[in-house]
Image (spheres, coloured by chain):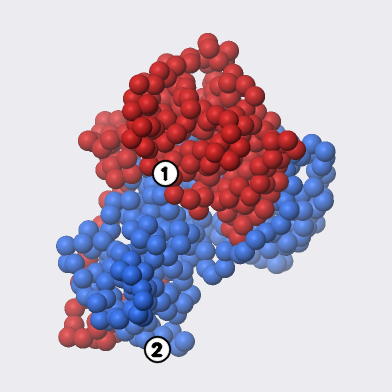
Chain colours: A red, B blue
């Protein structure tokens, strides 16, 4: 079983984001592996442990994204590859998906690709589906459980967390999945894993290595703004008893016409 | 397709996801600004009926395909049909549902164009569609444009108004043929297990959420034989019962902070925040939630926020329209009762 897990490096979820002169800043907050992607790494490792084989972590980004790959290695991935090219600066979701699909083809003989449900920076949630579409492989998104994976019959069966419950879907391998939190808590990097990751040699592939011309990005964010400040005047409701407070609050909520 | 806007109506067995009508409303607004009409498209079992409903909601034309290959929602054949119909359009709109988001993503690949998911506002500037997208879970707002056509847009649930239905607007939905055959589809739906049940957080007009504080009631004595952690979870479950009682009187959904989910008080599907659901109800009541930045990111656009917390310094009070500094174990039941009386329930 050869599994690729795609990870992204993002500002920590506790970061206070600001925009100054059109530049997005996350202050002193660290850059970390996208929290959703840790579930994708976990899913890949569980399948490797059950079926044998290798898990290769792939990320697209600048040199710093190697830290996210090292986290994936420390969790137990066998190898990691960074896709980095100046021509990918400002790449939109489809340009990213094209580069990831090219890397997956270059790795070769891949059975399964795992993604997190979305990255917490752009909040797009489309890269898994787009990468699958480019590869021509089934896209099984929002997977909460892999109920069966059979490398001889080349099939996978998953449960997807969708609006009306869990949809059970079968697909052919190779397939692309995106994983949700219900899949199970991701493991912590082990001490040995961290040591191994710190010594890992992570190759960088440019567009030339992928045999790709610079993909054209059509979606852009010409303007990023701080959200409008909420003009809130907080009214503290006080009273001599819980009942008195509740009666006042109930009247005020009805007056706001939100019930 | 001769119309400039195509709207994907997400439906199952003849019942449209309500957010689809909001997407149709956004499509009608864009068509008004760009000129031209709106085509609605419904796929799968019961789609003819939903397509007829789309005409009532104001679509100029309604298409449907009730082919067996589309009976169960599957991304591949849905995307292929959407992209085959979308050629020549300016924009394709979808509700931000599971199906909407991934069909939009795949159709964008087919047509080598762009996708702008989960937008909260749309404008037309100099003939170009400009979408407002919250990014970093709403900590920032991006104005987003796409230089290719048709642009795939998914509208955030509850961000756009639903048009008024008028049953006198008549017309006949037109059947279209599927774009691919079963042999070309690599997935198969074998069934469903469980159901989401209750009110979904995304569409809820009212959400009552509990945090770490729901376990904080020393007066409760847990049943014998529980260890410390089990006793904590037992206490939290009593607290969440009060949260649920209030939600049910208000016809709302139950939310939770990440701290409450991580502590094992309540399943993940209730989590509101950056790594949970981003919600925007009319009323958000936060009980025993301090209001970490990740939680704020998930509920900051709620119309009216009420905070109930013992700690007067809790950051959640800074976002709240109304605050109660007090014990949720006393306030929640009293508030449930006061609202039950007023709402006649």
Residue at image mark 1: A187
Question: Chain for mark 2?
Answer: B
Q: Nearer the viewer, residue B89 or A226?
A: A226
Label 1: how many residues lie within 10 Å, few (<14), some (14-19) or many (20+)?
Answer: some
Left or right: A155 as drawn, with respect to B228: right
User: From mark 1 to mark 2, how far is it between C-alphas?
Assistant: 49 Å
Numbered badge on residue B341: 2
Left or right: B231 as drawn, with respect to A167: left
Counting from the top left corner in percent of width and height, residue A184 is at 48, 50
Question: Chain for mark 1?
Answer: A
Tell me if residue A67 can be seen. Answer: no
Left or right: A35 as drawn, with respect to A214: left
> Compared to B73, does A225 lie above or below?
above
Local secondary structure at mark 2: helix
**Residue at left offset 58%, top offset 13%:** A211
Quarter of the figure with residue B299 = bottom left
Quadrant where the image shows the C terminus of chain A = bottom left
Counting from the top left corner in percent of width and height, residue B173 is at 78, 54
**Residue at left offset 73%, top offset 61%:** B13
Quarter of the figure with residue A136 = top right
Local secondary structure at mark 1: loop
**Residue at left offset 76%, top offset 60%:** B46
């Amino acid at each position: 079983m050869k599994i690729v897990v795609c990870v992204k490096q993002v500002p920590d979820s506790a970061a206070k984001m600001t925009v100054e002169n059109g530049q997005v800043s996350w202050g002193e907050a660290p850059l970390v592996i996208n929290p959703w992607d840790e579930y994708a790494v976990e899913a890949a490792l569980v399948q490797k442990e059950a079926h044998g084989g290798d898990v290769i972590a792939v990320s697209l980004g600048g040199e710093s994204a190697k830290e996210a790959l090292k986290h994936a290695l420390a969790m137990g991935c066998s190898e990691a590859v960074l896709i980095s090219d100046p021509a990918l600066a400002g790449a939109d979701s489809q340009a990213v998906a094209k580069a990831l699909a090219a890397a997956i083809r270059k790795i070769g003989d891949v059975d399964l690709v795992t993604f997190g449900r979305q990255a917490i920076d752009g909040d797009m949630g489309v890269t898994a589906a787009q990468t699958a579409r480019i590869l021509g492989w089934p896209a099984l998104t929002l997977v909460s459980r892999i109920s069966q994976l059979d490398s001889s019959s080349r099939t996978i069966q998953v449960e997807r967390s969708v609006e009306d419950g869990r949809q059970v879907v079968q697909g052919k391998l190779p397939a692309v999945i995106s994983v949700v939190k219900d899949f199970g808590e991701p493991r912590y990097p082990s001490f040995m894993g961290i040591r191994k990751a710190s010594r890992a040699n992570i190759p960088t592939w440019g567009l030339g290595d992928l045999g790709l011309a610079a993909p054209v990005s059509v979606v852009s964010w010409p303007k990023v703004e701080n959200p409008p400040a909420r003009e809130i005047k907080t009214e503290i409701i006080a009273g001599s008893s819980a009942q008195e407070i509740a009666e006042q609050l109930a009247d005020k909520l009805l007056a706001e016409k939100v019930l | 397709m001769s119309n400039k806007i195509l709207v994907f109506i997400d439906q199952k067995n003849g019942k449209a996801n309500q957010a689809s009508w909001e997407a149709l409303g956004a499509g009608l607004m864009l068509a008004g600004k760009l000129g031209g009409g709106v085509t609605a498209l419904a796929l799968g079992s019961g789609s003819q009926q939903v397509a007829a409903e789309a005409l009532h909601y104001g679509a100029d034309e309604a298409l449907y395909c009730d082919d067996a290959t589309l009976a169960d929602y599957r991304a591949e054949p849905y995307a292929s049909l959407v992209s085959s119909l979308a050629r020549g359009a300016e924009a394709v709109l979808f509700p931000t549902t599971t199906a909407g988001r991934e069909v939009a993503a795949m159709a964008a690949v087919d047509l080598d164009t762009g996708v702008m998911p989960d937008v909260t506002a749309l404008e037309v500037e100099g003939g170009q569609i400009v979408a407002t997208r919250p990014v970093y879970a709403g900590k920032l707002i991006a104005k987003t444009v796409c230089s290719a056509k048709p642009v795939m847009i998914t509208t955030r649930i509850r961000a756009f108004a639903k048009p008024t239905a008028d049953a006198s607007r008549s017309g006949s939905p037109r059947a279209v043929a599927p774009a691919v055959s079963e042999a070309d589809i690599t997935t198969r739906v074998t069934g469903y297990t469980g159901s989401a049940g209750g009110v979904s957080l995304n569409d809820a007009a009212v959400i009552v959420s509990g945090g770490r504080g729901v376990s904080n009631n020393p007066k409760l004595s847990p049943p014998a034989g529980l260890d410390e952690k089990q006793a904590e979870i037992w206490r939290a479950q009593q607290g969440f019962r009060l949260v649920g009682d209030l939600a049910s009187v208000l016809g709302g959904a139950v939310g939770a902070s990440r701290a409450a989910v991580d502590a094992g008080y309540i399943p993940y599907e209730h989590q509101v925040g950056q790594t949970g659901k981003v919600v925007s109800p009319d009323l958000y009541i936060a009980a025993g939630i301090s209001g970490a930045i990740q939680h704020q990111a998930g509920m900051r656009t709620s119309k009216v926020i009420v905070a109930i917390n013992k700690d007067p310094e809790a950051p959640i009070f800074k976002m709240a329209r109304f605050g109660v500094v007090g014990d949720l174990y006393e306030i929640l039941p009293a508030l449930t009762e006061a609202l039950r009386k007023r709402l006649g329930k």
